[in-house]
Amino acid sequence: MNIHKIFLVILMGLTSVAFAGNDQSADYLFEKGNAAYQNENYSEAIDQYQSVLALGLESGSLYYNLGNAYYRTGAIGLAILNYERALKWLPNDENVRFNLKLANLTVKDRIDPPPEFFLFRWIRQATNLLSSRGWGLLVGIFIGIASIDIAILIIAEVKRLRTFLKYLTGISVVIVIISMAGMIPRHRIETGKNVGIIIHYSVQSLAAPQEGSTELFVVHEGTKVAILDKDGDWLKIELIDGKQGWIPADDLGII
Amino acid sequence: MNVKKPLGLLIILIFLLVLTGATHAEELRVSASVDRNQITADDLITFTIQIEGTSDFPDVPPPQSPDFVIVAGPSQSSSIQIINGRMNASKSISWRIAPTKSGKLVIPSVSITYRRSVYKTEPVIVDVSGQSASQPQTKQVPPAPQPKASQGEGVLLKAIPSKTTVYKGEELNVAFALYFKNVRTYAPKKLPDAKGFWIEEFLIKSEPDITTENLDGVTYKKAIIKRLALFPTTSGNLVVDPFVIDAEVIVPSQRRRSIFDDFLDDSFFDNSFGQTKVVSVSSSPLRVTVQDLPELGKPSNYSGAVGRFTISASIDTAVTTENQALTLKYQISGTGNISSLKMPELQLPNTLEVFEPKIGKSVNNQGDAISGTVTYEYVLIPRSSGRIRIPPVTFSYFDPNRGGYVSATARGFDIRVNPKGKTFASDRSSLNKEEVSLLGQDIRFIRRDNSGWNQISSSVFSEFWFWLLTVSSVVILIGAISFRWWIEKLETNISFARKRRAWPKSQKAFVLLDEKLKMGDLSGLASILNQILVGFISDRLNLSSAGISVAEIESQLSEKAIADETISRIARILSELEQLRFLPTAADAEKYSALVQEEKELITLLNKAI
């Protein structure tokens, strides 16, 4: 490990400390947003929640509440976008799933996704059991346990605990592997920018990233699309059924 | 072998050949002629090719000569006569051609292929004299083809073009000026016709302004009686045919001239004192060179507009509802070939239903140039709601004054189309059971708890603790493994173990030695010192320490590239110690401590070197 890396790690540690100050103002704004929501002042609630995002902070609850506020104002696309974002942090939350399902009922383009192979679904659901930080904590703890076990086993002349330590090491290594298998896809989901929601009522998808080029199809508010490419202010999208086209970037909210 | 049979066949064959040859031996006669051989450069002549002798007329190619251009034609006429049972068919093909220069010009022979034979017409010589029409108009020369008679009557008709070289589609104005002395009235007999032009006529006052002008020393009155705007639709050398009028000329009476004559002559109006005579007056044909528009810089959407134009767009509303029509209007106005303008194709989104545009044209034929406005009115019906973009429209035209292409742009529009009332998914039948049960429900309430904040778009990899845990674990693992490796090497590898242990062993021995020296116990010191040095060297070099000679140590050390000075010091101290072993009293405590000091120095030196 060279000096640069050590410095980088220390810097990362310091920045996470520095952001702790922001957390308090984020809590305050979150509370104000919740109060506004309860008073049915939804646009005020949206403003408060948005100012938390402006601090550079996010959380599942924030996105869920913001989604609710948008749903109440009738902005279905933005509501779905924020429910989807909330799902990143609360992958198995019953309330988020319910509200998202309800919001999706009003989406015009009902594109049925191709049925998922049950094994893949199980894997996806298992991955979503924890956030990347949850999986990362498991990786960190069990990699530590395994390392200490191995260190004891190879240095010290332990006789009675040897078998126990061997089993402990084996189990820890398995947990580390499983956690890494969960952590990496979750990291992709949490930092990924490749899925979006259409946030305007109807958007024309063109054949090329250029005004006036041939129109291919129309997508409506709330439709979930994959982002394949970017060209200036244009995004190349793919629908679940495989159709591809270019739309202006401001018509899409990235999850 | 029977020879007769093939011979008979041959005879029949020859007979047949002669027979068919006879039927094809019709005499084809071709000839070429012109209506006049003596012309001026401004005249047109008719070139005719006559074919006789067959009713099955072959194709006749047009005459090809750089000296002439074909102005009109070919026109064809054919006749079939049967005289005394003999059929006589003839066909004549004629072209109107104009010379491109003066002098003795030759219309070359034309080759006509008929049933695999080639017939050639005789070349025709035409004598072209006089001025070419392309000469500057400032030269006040009356056009040569004016019939002498009409000039004699004091009437001339001249075609005055604004220019003689134009771009395809560029406006060319031709004014027809009547020069006269004594004309009561006139009537157009043949309007000027011009192939390859699109003609727009200017509005002319019914009572034209009359000016006087001097032509060849003769003073004429001049009136512009017709003005045309010509827009060439093809390129090349084009000809504007003559304008022919019938003018009623007052013939001067034979009575003696009186002082009134001049006064009476000087009248465009009725001169009741003279007799009138109708004279046919014709202008000379006008030759115009039409250039193709330059290819350089031609926009892809260019559709033939030449002149100066502007385009504007308007829309009746920017906010509408689904299935509610809106009107999009484009207006192109300016000067130039207004009548042949084409609206650039609109790039409208699929969600808009577009109807054929209503086109309105207004042409202004007053003033110096043809101007006007064309409007295109599109009715659009948005079929779905949302934001609809109507992109800007670019209209390109060629500006002959600038000699280049210019693009004018009409703005685009953003139309907000509101849905016809919000509904749930358009097709409720696509909902499944679970979804139908959801229809009446409302969303769940917000969450008040917050499980902590994360930086946006961050994951576990931006957490300090994650790297601390994993990196320290790896460090522990590597440390344990290398420690284990160290131990194992010490245990299994004797030379490695001896080498590693040599230094601590010598240091330990020195500590004991120092204590002994302090106590004043000098017995066996030389032997211990000897053992320490020999032991250190043999441990380091993995040699057997028992019975090793000084010479052997010397050779081993020099092999390891130890400095000669150090080696000689070692040899000296070893021999000194050897002597002291047998004569322990030969040295005092001071001498011993000096020896210990030197040995310590030497071992430190060797520790670094081997």
Image (cartoon, coloured by chain):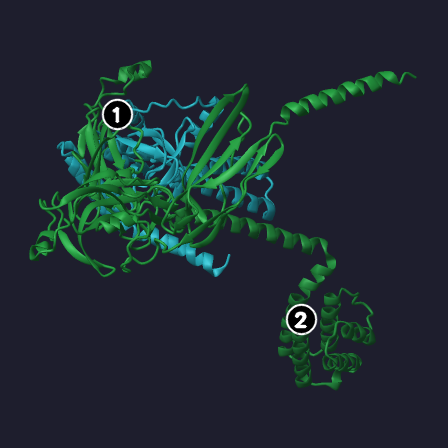
Chain colours: A cyan, B green
> Circles 2 and 1: CB distance less than 8 Å?
no
Is B593 rendered above or below residue B540? below
Report which residue position mark 1 lands on. B383
Is residue A30 visible in the rendered image? The answer is: no
Q: Residue furthest right?
A: B1
Identify the subunit bearing mark 2.
Answer: B
In the foreground, B95 or B33: B33
Q: Position of residue B409 (x, y in %)?
A: 26, 45
Is residue A32 visible in the rendered image? The answer is: yes
Report which residue position mark 2 lands on. B607
Three-letter residue code for mark 1: Arg
Q: Residues within 10 Å of mark 1 (few under 14, many from 20)?
A: some
Is A169 rendered above or below residue B17? below
Q: Secondary structure at mark 1?
A: loop
Which residue is found at the position 14% from the left and 48% from the top? B253
Is B451 rendered above or below residue A99? below
Three-letter residue code for mark 2: Asn
Q: Position of residue A247 (x, y in %)?
A: 34, 37
Identify the subunit bearing mark 1.
Answer: B
Quadrant of residue B561 within the rendered picture: bottom right
Q: Position of residue A91 (x, y in %)?
A: 36, 31
In the foreground, B153 or B255: B255
Q: Secondary structure at mark 2?
A: helix
In this rendering, which labeled residue sits more in front, label 2 or label 1? 1
Quadrant of residue B338 within the rendered picture: top left
Is B398 situated left or right of A122 in this image? left
CA separation in Å, label 2 and label 1: 93 Å
